[in-house]
Image (cartoon, grey):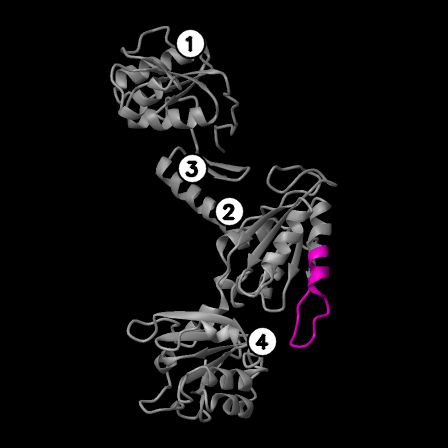
Amino acid sequence: MSDLLPLSLRVEGRRVVVVGGGAVAARSVDGLLAAGADVVVVAPEVVPGLAALAAAGRVRLERRPYAEGDLDGAWLAVTATGLPAVDAAVSAEAERRRTWCVDRGDAGRATAWTPSVARVDDVVVAVSAGRDPRRAVRLRDGVAAALQAGDLPLRRSPARSSSRSGVQAGGAGRVALVGGGPGDPGLLTARGRRLLAEADVVVVDRLGPRSVLEELDDDVLVVDVGKTPGNHPVPQERINEVLVEHGLAGRAVVRLKGGDPYVFGRGGEELAACRAAGLEVEVVPGVTSAVSVPAAAGIPVTHRGVARGFTVLTGHEDLAATPALLAGVPVEAHTVVLLMGVSALAASARALVATGRPPTTPAAVVEDGYGPRQRTTLGTLATIADLAAERGVRAPAVVVVGDVVRLAPGWGAGAGPEARPGSPPGSQPG
């Protein structure tokens, strides 16, 4: 059984005496100032950081050796001189005065210990590991990492108020637009996971990393607004209304989207709707499928000596009917990425040829990037639509056009793709 009683002390405005002027004492002073303490430092010599704090009026500095009586009026004492006799004298005076004392020179003699502290927003976790400071630091870092990643239950009780989650029930809450990446939960950012761990409501797309929903508390409301090609059961206007309604009800809302909210994700529209309603909004970028899905198939969108840049377009648009979309897109040493482009693939390929790309330009369609049915179909602008139709290619898929496609595994040395053994022509399993 431990002989220590864990406590948190309110030292704001209260006198705390720090004896010692070295680096260890300076670290103690930093923590005390962060807590609002009235700090007095007693030391004949001090490190530059302490001298600067004294010059700025943030601490009172007595440039002299410690003397009996220095702890008069102190609520807490810290001794860190590195001189055993002096530290012992400070501890002895503190004992006589019934003042708690942190003794950096002898933890066994101390009557108080400063734990290693992890702070994440308004959550403070103090770790004391059997008076072993290095062990405590390692544990603290582990706890902090788990808090930051959302691996620990950060969600606030609905009836409690918080400057971060909003206010008391009935007041304005908070909305976070979180990019979930291409679907693999491992590619969801740590910030995104943390916000999910705090959420009261999650509004989710079909292409987001839906497996993370299994980690939510049972009472978290999940609103599915997923779309499939040609089927949008929840229009964007209603999605905006859902975010605003729950936010104004004082809830912490996460809009979990596939890819990045601002890359054909209508995140800007949702942001505008929430801000117009007076809600606080945070945008968490995601790993966009425009880059990550080609990478999953071994295709970089830029490569030295091959492609100096890339353009991302929506494949929903009829590129032939809207030539302005391609008017400023370079032809040489440039990659074109089409999102949501399966249904219009043939028309898009013809439009790209019509704007100056040779029919032999390499092209690839990557289906279900990072998903269980990931598959890559390789061809050229002249052949890719027919190959995709033969293979039964279906959404979600990303189309890549340009010489970078030649870098994909399975592309032969000739003008066309080379299938892996056992694979149908023009295809490569992911």
The answer to whether marks 4 and 1 mark residues whose Cβ atoms lie closer than 8 Å is no
Question: Judging from the image, what secondary structure is the residue with disc 1 in?
Answer: helix
The residue beneath circle 3 is 129
Q: Pinpoint residue 245: horizontal percent, then vertical percent.
A: 73, 51
What's the amino acid at mark 2? Leu
Label 3 to label 2, Cα distance in Å? 19 Å
Question: Judging from the image, what secondary structure is the residue with disc 2 in?
Answer: helix
Horizontal arrangement in the rendering, residue 283 relative to residue 39 (left or right): right
- Give the number of marks: 4
Q: Which residue occupies 49% across, 16% down?
A: 14
Label 1 to label 3, Cα distance in Å? 28 Å
Which one is earlier in the sequence, the residue at label 3 or at label 4?
A: 3
Magenta-drawn stretch contains 232: yes
The residue beneath circle 1 is 96
Whether residue 409 is visible to the viewer of this picture, yes or no, is yes
Q: Pinpoint residue 384: horizontal percent, then vertical percent.
A: 48, 88
Mark toward the viewer: 3 or 2: 2
The residue beneath circle 2 is 147
Magenta-drawn stretch contains 199: no
Closest to the observer, 228 or 74: 228
Residue 333, relative to residue 153: is it above or below? below
Q: Pinpoint residue 127: horizontal percent, then vertical percent.
A: 46, 37
Which one is earlier in the sequence, the residue at label 4 or at label 2?
A: 2
Q: Pinpoint residue 60: horizontal percent, then vertical percent.
A: 37, 14
Residue 317 image label: 4
Mark toward the viewer: 4 or 1: 4
What's the amino acid at mark 3? Ala
